[in-house]
Amino acid sequence: MDKFTRLALRAGGIVSAGFVAALAAPAAAADCSDLANLKLADGKVTSAARIEAGKFSLPQAAGGPPPGVLAAGFSKLPAFCRVQATMTPTPDSDIKVEVWLPASGWNGKFVTIGNGVWAGSISYSQMGDPLTRGYAVAATDTGHTGNGLTADWAVGHPEKLVDFGYRAVHETVVTGKAAVAAFYGAGPKLSFWDSCSTGGRQGLMEAYRFPADFDAISAMAPANPMTELMTQSMWVGWQPNRAPGAKLSPAKLANVHAAVLGRCDKLDGLEDGLVMNPTACTFDPASMQCTGAESDSCLTPVQVETMRAIYDGIRDANGKVVLGGWPYGAEMQLAALTQGPAPFPVALTYYSMLVFGDRQDWDWKSFGYIRDRQAGIDYGREILDVPPTGLDAYFARGGKLLLSHGWNDGLIPAKNSLLFYTMLYHDLPQQQAQDQLRYYIVPGMEHCSGGEGVSQFDTLGTIDRWATTGVAPYRIEATRPTVGAGFPGAPPAPPREPLSRPLCPYPLYAEYDGEGDTALASSFTCKPPREPGA
C-alpha cells in the first residue's frame, strides 16, 4: 500500500467512522424533518422531507439517465425520508447529495449509486430499486451540472475535477451514513456500492482511496483507467474518418456482427444466436472483403482496415499493442462512437478542453496516439485512474469486489476490465483472490444493459449475500428482457421468448449440456476453457 492510500485510509476512517459513531448514540429522529438540523463537517442539509408512497416526481433539471441505463418510473416507491445536502469541501466545490431512507422496513443496510460519463446529475433512475428492497440509498451529481458529454465544467476548475474523480463520492458516503445514523439511531451494519460505467470506476476508486467506506462493491463495465479510455474513444472515432470511404454504415456494422456470430456462436456447443464463450472467438474482417461491387454485405479494403484497427487497438512503431481495442461482438453499439464527423465528445473534450485546453490551434485530426496518449495519462492519472495494484487495503479488511462487463459493450471495451481483473488477481494473495474477487463476462450484453444476450441479473443481491454469508458467488442466473430496448422514437422491438443463462466466474463459460430446454440456465454447465485443438 502506497503512502497516499495509507493516509487516505487513516483520514477517511477518522472523519467518517468517528462522525457517524457520534451520531449513532441518540435515539432515532422523531420525524424526517429533524434531519434538516443534521450537522455535516463539509456542508449542510438543504432539505429533509417525507415523501409519501408513489408521490416522488423527478426534478425538472435532473437530466436523463447515463448512456446504457434506462430511466425508471417512481410510482411504486414506498414512503421515504428524502434528505438533500450540498457539500463544499473546497471553496470551489458544490456537491449535491441525496439520501433516501425507507420510512419503514429498513433492512439495516446502505447502498450508494454512481454516475455515467462525466456525471453532472444525480442518478435518480437507479435509486428506486434499492429503496423498494429496504436499503437506505445515496447518490451525488459529483459537484457540477450538465449533460455528462462534455468537460467544459472542469475548465479552470481543478477542484471540481477532483470532486468528480473521487472526492464527491466519499463525501456522499459520509453524509449518507450520518443521515442513516441520525434517522434510525444506528449506522448501517453493511454498506455496498452498486453501479456501472463511470459508476464502475467510482466503485474501484472507493476501494482504492477510501477502503473503509464499503463492505462489498459491484463495479460493472468500469470506465477505468479513464485516461486510457479517452484515448481509445479518440482512436475508434478517428478510424472511420481517417480516409474517404473508411466509415461503416450501421447496416454494414450489423452485417459484420452477423458474421462474428456465424463464426463463434457454436463455440459453446449450441447455435442460438449468442456467443457464450466469447474469449475463444476469432474473426478476420478480411473474410468480408468485397470481391465485386460494394454492398452492405461486404467491406471495401479501407473498411476492412477500419475494423482491424478497432479490434486490434493502438500499436507502436514495432507493431506491439500498447492499448487494446474492442472485442469481437461489440459491432452493433460501436455505431455510437463511429458515425459522427469527430470522436465521442466525452473523450474529445477531455483532450480539447483539459489536456490541450491551452492550445488554441490543437486539432484532433493531428492526435499522436503514442505521444498524446501519454499526455492524457499524465494530465489525469492521479485523479481519474485506479491502478490494479492499489486495492490491498480494501481486501485486507475483508472487502468483496464483483466485476462484470457486457462483452458486446460498444462504449467501453470489455477487454479493459478483463485486463484489470487479471492484473488485480495476480497482485493479491491467492486466498484473497479466490474468496474476495470475482469477474463475470456477460455474453451478448451491451453497455450496462441491452443487447441480444442475457442482461438482467441481481448485482446488489449478489454482493449482499456475499458480504452477509462470506460465501463467494459461483453461478449467477441472468435473464434476457422479453422486450428489447430500441432506439428513442423508434417503434418497439418485437417481443422475444424468455431466456435464461448462467453467468460463470471467469475464466469459466456456460456450455450447453447437450440436452434439456435451451431457453433455461439449468441446461448449461460452467466449464473451463478448452485447450487449443481440444
Image: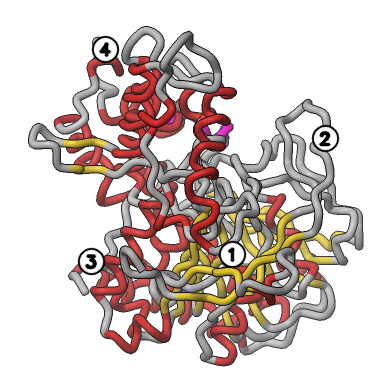
Give the image location of residue 458, x and y in percent. Answer: 66, 69
Q: Which residues are magenta?
A: 146-152
Which circle's residue, 2 or 1, is located before the other in the chain?
Answer: 1
Task: Kindly identify the amino acid type of the residue bearing the numbered disc 4.
Answer: Gln
Real-space Cα separation, disc 4 to disc 3, in angstroms:
35 Å
Residue 510, quarter of picture: bottom right
* Label 1 secondary element: strand
Tell me the crowding category of disc 3: few under 14, some 14 to 19, or many 20 or more residues within 10 angstroms, Cα based: few
Residue 3, quarter of picture: bottom left
Q: Which residue is mark 1?
A: 112
Task: Kindly identify the amino acid type of the residue bearing the numbered disc 2.
Answer: Pro
Real-space Cα separation, disc 2 to disc 1, in angstroms:
32 Å
Task: Kindly identify the amino acid type of the residue bearing the numbered disc 3.
Answer: Phe
Which circle's residue, 1 or 3, is located before the other in the chain?
Answer: 3
Residue 36 makes an appearance in the image: no
Residue 157, quarter of picture: top left
Of marks 1 and 3, the one in the foreground: 1
Check if residue 157 falls in the magenta segment.
no
In the image, what residue occupies the spot 72% across and 87% down? 27
